[in-house]
Image (cartoon, rainbow, N blue to C red):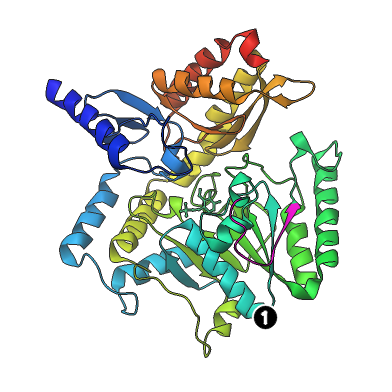
Amino acid sequence: TAVRVDLDARAYELDRSHVFHSWSAQAALHPVVLAGGRGCRVWDHAGREYLDFASQMVNVNIGHQHPVVTAAIADQAARLATIGPATANLQRGEAAQRITALAPDGMDKVFFTNGGADANENAIRMARLHTGRDKVLSTYRSYHGNTGAAVVATGDWRRMPNEYARGHVHFFGPYLYRSEFWASSPEEESERALRHLERVVQCEGPSTIAAILLETVPGTAGILVPPPGYLAGVRAIADRYGIVLILDEVMCGFGRTGRWFAFDGYDVRPDLITFAKGVNSGYVPVGGVVISDAIARTFDDTVFPGGLTYSGHPLAAASIVAALDVMADEGIVAHAERIGRTALGPALAELAGDCPVIGEVRGEGVFWAVELVADRATREPVSAATMARVKSDLIARGYLPFLADNRIHVAPPCVVTEAEVAEGAAILRDVLTALSAEEIR
Ligand code: PLP
């Protein structure tokens, strides 16, 4: 054990000395050391375990270290570890076939990228070239990735110092709990949000707009499950004005909502789908764009000006094939739907009933947000200091959380069991009931 504890100390020391972290001031960071994992659990070298109720970056949908997927990666590494994108490769083709088989009819091609941001980057480029138009509409309260156009399309604080791309316009999507539209029902929120979007389209000039880019279920922004009719209404607006609809399924896709694609639950059909994360549970970095036949045809005889050294990397491709086959064979998507409906959703609802600091619980599948408020009547968010306390208390009790603003996003792997749901909910209860009146204010 002494040697293993030393490895934890060394991992921490090396990290703090040499690793520069994302989205952070570097001085005050205290990263958790992780050395191994299985299913919903991860552990450090000394064997201290954590329940991973964030699925890391909401991407480890099949859980950690699925042996079929790690074996597929090892097999491919032994056969051919890398190959350029201009070649044909069996695993790459199988991966593209698996993904298009899940997409709506008439979406038969995949462009592979390194992750979610460059998937959105390239989808935006396709939409602009296909339509000959420039502007891209996306919502405040969204996250689309950290590259040129993707980060400017993003609708949160990360967009602000990154105004280097052109033609990005933002609008408000539906969010009934904090409605921008004074709505009092989901139907009203949907109708008014659609009216707002159509007015933005008209005022920006429909003939200048290439694409509407939306997360089907906005994730990092708060797991904002769209109200009835909203996505179908956006599709109708896009059709009315000849605008390409890009649905960003990077976080909500591949089982997270209890469906293969989140949009499978709605009467909507995108022109482009961007994906990453859950497609292979992040075992190898990968993302991509699923392309409609109409947009693909634009590039039949015209060069698509975009590419990446690692587009369709064979290790990524092999991991996609194995991960999607495992998800189908083991019924993992259906499990995510069932556990959300019968265990995780009810456990969080019960927690909300007992903890006045919870203002709202919303979500589906293994994709839930718990909003913490100082006052249920005004819905005022709890302070950043309170969220920092919640974070350190959860980690101290062996629960790895995903926190954003005043919310705990409860997003365990799709394979989470009832016992693990009960364990996670009990830790949340301990931490939330321990907050003092002072901290809640
Ligand atoms: N789109 C959405 C909805 C995301 O949640 C993310 C990442 O969290 C991205 C895009 C960016 O993906 P990546 O970090 O792989 O570039």
Residue 306 vs 169, above or below: the answer is below
At a point 50% along the width and 81% down the height, the residue shown is: 304
The picture places residue 317, in percent across and down from the top left corner, at: 34, 63
**From where the camera sits, is residue 105 visible?**
no
Circle 1 SS class: loop
- Residue 429 lies, with reference to residue 146, above or below; the image says above
Name the residue rendered at 73%, 25% in the picture: 380
User: Over which residues does the magenta segment extend?
Assistant: 161-171
User: Percent from the top left, x then y, of residue 327?
Assistant: 40, 49
> Which residue lies at the image location 79% right of the left edge and 21% below the top edge?
377
Residue linked to disc 1: 132
Most extreme residue toward the left is: 3
What predominant SS class does the magenta segment belong to?
Answer: loop
User: Which residue is nearer to you in this view: 1 or 155?
Assistant: 155
Residue in the image at 38% along x and 50% along y: 282
22, above or below 284, in the image: above
Q: Quadrant of residue 244?
A: bottom right
Q: How far across and how far down the image is residue 265, in percent? A: 63, 51
Q: Is residue 99 left or right of residue 315?
A: right
Q: x, y percentage for residue 149?
A: 58, 63
